[in-house]
Image: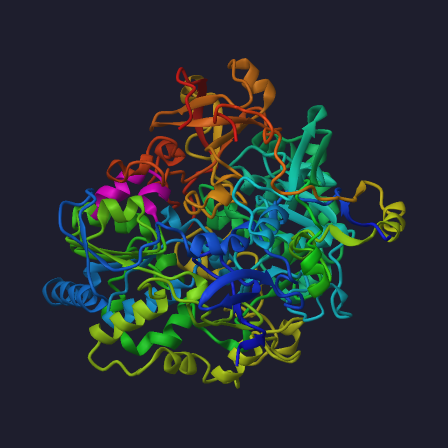
Amino acid sequence: MSDIADGETRIVRSTVWSAGAGCHGGCGVNLHVRDGKLEKIEGIADHPYNQGTLCPRALALKDYAYHPNRLTRPLIRTGARGTDTWRPASWDEALSLVESKLSAVKQEFGAESTVFVQGTGRDVGGWLVFLAYNYGSPNWMQALPGNSCYHPRLLAMKVAMGDYVVPDNSQFQQARYESPEWRLPECYVVWGQNPVATCNDGNHGHWIIHCVKRGSKLVVIDPNYTWLASRADIWLPLRPGTDGALALGMLNVIIEEELYDKDFVEKWTVGFEQLKARAAEYPLDRVAEICWLKKDLIAEAARAYARASPAALQWGVPVDMAPEGFSVASAINHLWAITGNVEIPGGMIVARPAFGMTAYPMSQDAIQDMYGDLMDKDQQAKRIGVDEFPLVRHMHWRAQPDSVITQALTGKPYPLKASVIAGTNFVVGAQDPLRWRKAFENLDFNVVVDLFMTPTAMALADVVLPSASFAERDGIRAWWSPLTAQNTAIRFGDCRSDAEICFELSRRLRDDFQFETLPDLYRYYLKDTGQTLEDVREEHWIMPPRDSPAMPYHRHEKGLLRADGKPGFATPSGKIELASSQMQEWGYDPLPVYVEPTYSPVSRPDMAEEYPLILNTGSRTIAFFHSEHRNVPKLRRLNPDPLVEIHPETAANYGIADGDWVWLENHVGKCRMRAKFAYVHPRVVVAQHSWWMPEKVREKDYGAYESNVNMLMPGGLSSKSGFGGAQVKSVLCRIRKADDQAAA
Amino acid sequence: MTVYGLWIDYEYCTGCKACEIACQQEHGFDTEELGIQVLEQLMNGGQTYNFMPIPTDLCDLCTERVQREGRPSCVHHCMAKVMEFGPVEDLARRMSQKPRSVIWAPKPRPRDQRPFDGADTGGSAQ
């Protein structure tokens, strides 16, 4: 059993993921429970992911789970949307209502007229797609323009390498940094991310700190002088949105100076000459001018990276947010490809789910394996965005969000009628949030699943279903290794986990639904892994054996990456495609290219006269996960006000003192924030995102549009590929001190 | 008597404040009560950028917990793994090998000892 007796206190071993810390998860925790109540949360010292450590959000779990404003029962709206008019209902009544509404939509308009909407990479994604496919709708989506969070990077890697790679921080070794197989990266490049504040996409941010402490040379690419930048050997404070030019410029230095790995390029890549020609279009003078960097610094960074072996690179969302995020990701991918930092200890290693267990599909192949027979080709062809974007048609597993919004507003090519919205608060968090709000106001029936009443639920929901924190749920997870279990420690109110909600709705909405219970479904997911559900729960985490295809290293040499068992990569050519045959076939540029941001001092000098500063947003904070956690006092204490970081000299030019309330304004809108002095690039301000005020009046949107930087985001800026391009890192603005200095 | 303390490698303290929340949880403190506080030192034009965890006078070095589990909650949960607990004499040897580190030897005062306890403030100060 997962419970360990300890006097009167029961200890339940579980895994952090989703509601609670809010994050992409992975940390192993002991949940201490007495008399059915959570007493405390502790990191498990020998867990390979977090090695005992925990972040403030996980440590505040008790305050989150027992928050007085938690939703405890399903709510059915009795008045108009936007008003605080609800009546509590039983689960059976609420789910019966959802069932009848969604069945009616399916019958009258087709299942594709219901969209399933998630936010970031929480486990609800796996459950929503399960529900969508059982119901029959191909329209599962992420509430973010251009899917501009990890998807461009994932697809760029998939297209070029046939797999996803992650930096090797020894995370796939039980002994971690002490493992004899692992090597410390000689150079670590952190590209557009503040790993101190975030653990993105299965990568614990502080692993990078551990490597730097052990001696990795650090290169930080960030317009903001973060604490990490202060510890860097080389800091490149580039102009926001110019990452693509920098990557191509670095490729050019490495190729021109012959610092690339000739053997690896020869043996394992195709398209090198084409890439060489393309990179040559980005000489240092040009790149330095584009990026607002000194050319020597760019060359130094390129050399430091290329001369190190092994070298690791961790990248962040600015890559995706660039005008052509897919293209930027491709260029960075080629940096590790031509330097041979692939499948070597301390380099970039292929990441696959432990034991091949998929509960959260990360590719179209996985969807096909899991649910292919649930939906015929004609129905899949109705996925929104497939006609417009070949990359969505051929490679992607979700609807294209910008196309969904347009379709919700126009009703073309077919009407959208209903939605299930879970784990997202997009009327706050989307760019141009009021347009998103209007799009979903157009739908006849919206279900919102959340733990708290949010501006999104208040504005849009007809039914609200109360979800559970990770302490209140069972589950299994393989993102990536080890395979881990989530075990239920407590119950709260009448809340149910996302898994339970989606499972029950699937049972109701599908006539020949084959599973009796959730554990039956977990067993189905585990059927090819050689592991039993009981073992996973008992062991809590299981690292795959060394010879497993999910484990590094050198798998391309051993024939462990391709379906046919031959050496090489899972691409059409079997090699890493520096020039992509598939992209060419689909009508795209096969090579990376730099595209200037839509609203920049370069592309819009006319606009820059009125709005001289570059507005950069979306950076993570340790206290909050996107729009969450403002209502947890212990976390809010860490960051009480919505902050915009500004260089002291820039602030002085505008008569702004540290701590002043200021207005950010541009051609789209404005918001009121509090200035915090920082050594951010003097022509850039960095504003926190997705602020709303849970303490404010519910029927006035909780103040969601007063200090919300998304009110300045143009929206609809998706790239030509359909991937990337939300550009929240690089629009224009001006700043002025607010007349009213009262707190928000 | 052996004096115990905390050794902190402030070169790599990332300012995440996990120690503050871990301490609050361990001791059941309220939102504004801290047993350790992380201060930011960003000055000299960015030349100096450090975070510095400083125990408050509520810090008892997790006496009860240490007997049970060996180390304070802040040390256990520190994400950058820059804190160690032990006899100050041992920590001093550690410090002698690691510049940009510090040792704190906290000693708690009674939790209810507040400055205005003896004054008639007309109920306007707590």
Locate residue A70 relative to residue A278 in the image: left or right: left
Q: Nearer the viewer, residue A31 or A157?
A: A31
Which residue is situated farthest in the left direction here?
A108
Identify the residue shown where x is 43% and y is 49%.
A148
Q: Position of residue B114 (x, y in %)?
A: 61, 34
Locate residue A68 relative to residue A698 in the image: left or right: right
Q: Nearer the viewer, residue A52 or A249?
A: A52
Q: Position of residue A657 (x, y in %)?
A: 54, 18
Q: Position of residue A327 (x, y in %)?
A: 49, 48
Instruction: State how the image is colored.
Output: rainbow
Magenta stretch bounds: A425-440
Q: Is residue A256 visible?
A: no
Answer whether residue A183 is magenta in the image: no
Q: Position of residue A42 (x, y in %)?
A: 59, 61
Q: Nearer the viewer, residue A310 or A20?
A: A20
Q: Is residue A103 visible?
A: yes
Answer whether residue A430 is magenta in the image: yes
Identify the residue shown where x is 53% and y is 35%.
A240
Quadrant of the image for the C terminus of chain A? top left
> Looking at the picture, does residue A659 appear above or below residue A241?
above
> Looking at the picture, does residue A212 appear above or below residue A574?
above
> Looking at the picture, does residue A420 appear above or below residue A212?
below
Q: Nearer the viewer, residue A422 or A669?
A: A422
